[in-house]
């Protein structure tokens, strides 16, 4: 078992533990949606980690194609949960920008299942294996889908939303909240939900 498998498995396990804890808290405090949103985000990150691991260990183009398609489901959940969390917990973030992100991310999810392969690839023809730091990664060989630009634009909107929310919260004196729940989650969300797909596009 490689260090990548161990690391990604631990990440998924920690996220699922947090998800169960906050889901139980929400069951006792049904009027506080923040706990449910946090639990949903944790479940989504755990699922993304599982799909990332599946992609990295894929032995055939078909396996990689399936994982790239279905990773968009938890990515959608993570994006929606994150934006809603910022709005409910920090009372920040422009409403029109939030709804733009919801709509665009939903459109990406729909298009992803309409295209034969995914919104990221028109075709995946082969898999080759890349060795790095003692671990073996599966890398796709294929034709990128130009519609993936929509997904990248959604990432840009998410970044703008997060920065805007941070700027809103900072003058209130809630600087600790701004740093912990905006800045860290900005980069955490981007890394968790987008890094594998960016790598796919680079090597595709």
Image (cartoon, helix red, strand yellow):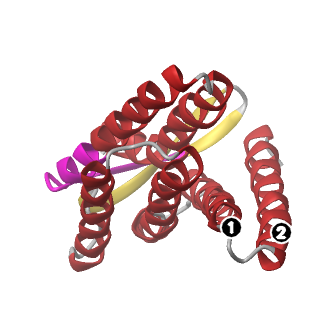
Let me know if residue 60 appears in the view.
yes
For residue 48, above or below residue 200: below
Total residue callouts: 2
Secondary structure category for the residue under label 2: helix
At label 2, counting other C-alpha atoms closer than 10 Å, the crowd grade (few under 14, some 14-19, many 20 or more) is: some
Q: Nearer the viewer, residue 42 or 29?
A: 29
Left or right, 127 with respect to 12, comes to: left
The Cα–Cα distance between marks 2 and 1, rounded to whole angstroms, is 9 Å
User: Which dot marks residue 32?
Assistant: 1
Residue to which mark 2 is pinned: 25
Residue 57, given in percent of the width and then of the height, sits at 62, 55
Q: Nearer the viewer, residue 31 or 138?
A: 31
Residue 104, given in percent of the width and then of the height, sits at 24, 60
At label 1, counting other C-alpha atoms closer than 10 Å, the crowd grade (few under 14, some 14-19, many 20 or more) is: some
Q: Quadrant of residue 72?
A: bottom left
State which quarter of the image contains the C terminus: top left
The span picked out in magenta is: 138-154
Q: Would residue 140 be counted in the magenta stretch?
A: yes
Let me know if residue 144 appears in the view.
no
User: Which dot marks residue 81?
Assistant: none
Residue 199, given in percent of the width and then of the height, sits at 41, 39
Q: Nearer the viewer, residue 159 or 15?
A: 159
Contact (CB < 8 A) between labels 2 and 1? yes
Residue under the point 48% across and 64% down: 71
């Amino acid at each position: 078992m490689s260090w990548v498998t161990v690391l990604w498995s631990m990440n998924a396990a920690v996220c699922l533990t947090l998800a169960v804890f906050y889901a139980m808290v929400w069951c006792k405090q049904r009027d506080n949606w923040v706990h449910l949103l946090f639990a949903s985000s944790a479940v989504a990150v755990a699922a993304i980690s599982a799909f990332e691991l599946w992609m990295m260990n894929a032995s055939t183009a078909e396996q990689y194609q399936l994982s790239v398609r279905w990773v968009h489901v938890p990515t959608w959940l993570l994006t929606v949960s994150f934006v809603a969390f910022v709005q409910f917990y920090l009372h920040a973030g422009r409403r029109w920008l939030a709804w733009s992100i919801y709509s665009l991310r939903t459109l990406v999810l729909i298009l992803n299942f309409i295209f034969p392969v995914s919104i990221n690839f028109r075709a995946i023809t082969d898999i080759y294996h890349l060795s790095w730091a003692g671990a073996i990664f599966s890398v796709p060989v294929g034709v990128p889908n130009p519609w993936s630009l929509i997904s990248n634009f959604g990432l840009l909107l998410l970044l703008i939303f997060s920065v805007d929310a941070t700027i809103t919260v900072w003058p209130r004196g809630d600087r600790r909240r701004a740093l912990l729940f905006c800045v860290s989650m900005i980069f955490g969300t981007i890394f968790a939900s987008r890094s594998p797909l960016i790598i796919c596009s680079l090597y595709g």
